[in-house]
Amino acid sequence: MSENYATMHEIIVAARNNSSRSVWNYVTGAAETETTLRRNRHCLDCHALRPRILRDVREIDTSRTFMGHKLRIPCLLAPIGSLQTITPEGGIAVAKAAAEFGTVNLVSTVTEPTLEEIAQATSHPKIFQIYIRGDEAWVDALIDRARDSGYAAICLTVDSAYYGRRERQLITGWRPPSIQRYGENARALQAGLTWEWMDRMRERGGLPFILKGVQTAEDAELAIQHGVDTIYVSNHGGRQLDHGDGTLEILKEVVEVAKGKAEIVVDGGIVRGTDVLKALAVGADVVALGRYQAWALAAGGQATLVRALEIMEAEIKNAMGLTGISSLDELDPSYVKEARAVNQAYELSAFPFLPEEIRGPQ
Ligand SMILES: Cc1cc2nc3c(=O)[nH]c(=O)nc-3n(C[C@H](O)[C@H](O)[C@H](O)COP(=O)(O)O)c2cc1C
């Protein structure tokens, strides 16, 4: 039963045991040498918290308002494609878990069931994430469907002009159903995305607009000039361009140009309450959880995802109390400093007590 899980370690063990080798590799792997993936984790490990003492921390509030929506913890559920391969209910399991726990989830274009079915599954706010799989008329129709189904915002992912060379998948020959469904030709249309097309999408939707995959201060500035509401710093969990920087480092330069002008989301390697505090201290408004969410779903669908979020909440609360803050609004750059990492970063290095056979290449 999911409520028996005390830590994420047991959830990850269950996820591995429940998943085929192909699905495990799809969820856990990244592009080429997986350097970007490791840098995400390494950057988090290279920052230490600076706790303050002798403050009354009996009451701790882990909530945050994002795009006008109250979240129980400052963690969104990142968009994940082909969720139906990870848990039978697919996107519905995520929506129900987000509603039950009290957060917002992003629904990928390339997951199942349909965006309408996911929208109808719950009444809590959800965000629709766009991938290009057709021409402008196709995208317009997709945006209309998302708006008419009641999605609270549109998120356009822009780090995926080409599909990352994920060698764990290439070696086994397994391709996610999303690629099989739309085919390589439809996917290639993604390479034609421009700022002008993005403007068109933003206007078409008439909803708050998030740009996901911003990785430089220059592009954050352009995004603000183009009226983007929320800048989402992400390198797709290292699944796209290899040899990019870790997102906590990228976040620093983005915060310099975007803080106060747009809301800021960051993801990449965030799997611990202390990771969340570091990202918020550097300047993110909220973080998003990718693999953390996927492992929980693989372990036990909706119920285990709720449990994983409860574990994250407990970690955030504990870390806040030990850092001497009772509200997330107190976090600022004075709460973090650069520090030497104490271990070799890889996708599971935040979970040192996993059995050897699950830890994989290190
Ligand atoms: C299995 C899997 C599928 C994903 N599918 C999508 C997707 O359809 N759209 C998208 O914008 N990002 C997708 N992502 C990227 C996530 O939204 C997020 O940026 C990334 O997972 C964050 O890194 P983390 O996994 O280290 O938390 C996917 C990630 C994973 C692990």
Image: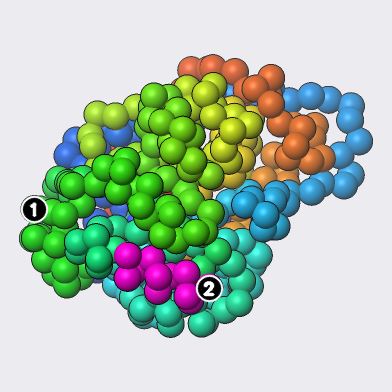
Q: Check the image and report above or below for 347 versus 171.
A: above
CB of mark 2 near ligand 1 (< 8 Å) = no
Residue drawn where x is 53% and y is 73% of the image: 150
Residue drawn where x is 31% and y is 52% of the image: 28
Q: Residue 269 in the image: x percent, y percent?
A: 43, 41
| Segment colored magenta | 140-150
Element at label 2: loop
The residue wearing badge 2 is: 150
The residue wearing badge 1 is: 171
Q: Within 10 Å of the Cα at label 1, are there few (<14), some (14-19), or many (20+) other Cα atoms?
A: few
Describe residue 252's horizontal placement relative to residue 281 as left or right: left
In what quadrant of the picture does the C terminus appear?
A: top left
Residue drawn where x is 30% and y is 48% of the image: 197
Q: Which label's residue is closer to the chain start, 2 or 1?
A: 2
Identify the amino acid type marked 2. Answer: Gly
Q: Which mark is residue 254?
A: none
**Magenta stretch encompasses residue 144:** yes
Q: Check the image and report above or below for 305 versus 69.
A: below
Q: Check the image and report above or below for 95 versus 57.
A: below
CA gap between label 2 and label 1 equals 40 Å
**Magenta stretch encompasses residue 255:** no
* Magenta residues, dominant SS class: helix
Q: Residue 175 in the image: x percent, y percent?
A: 15, 63
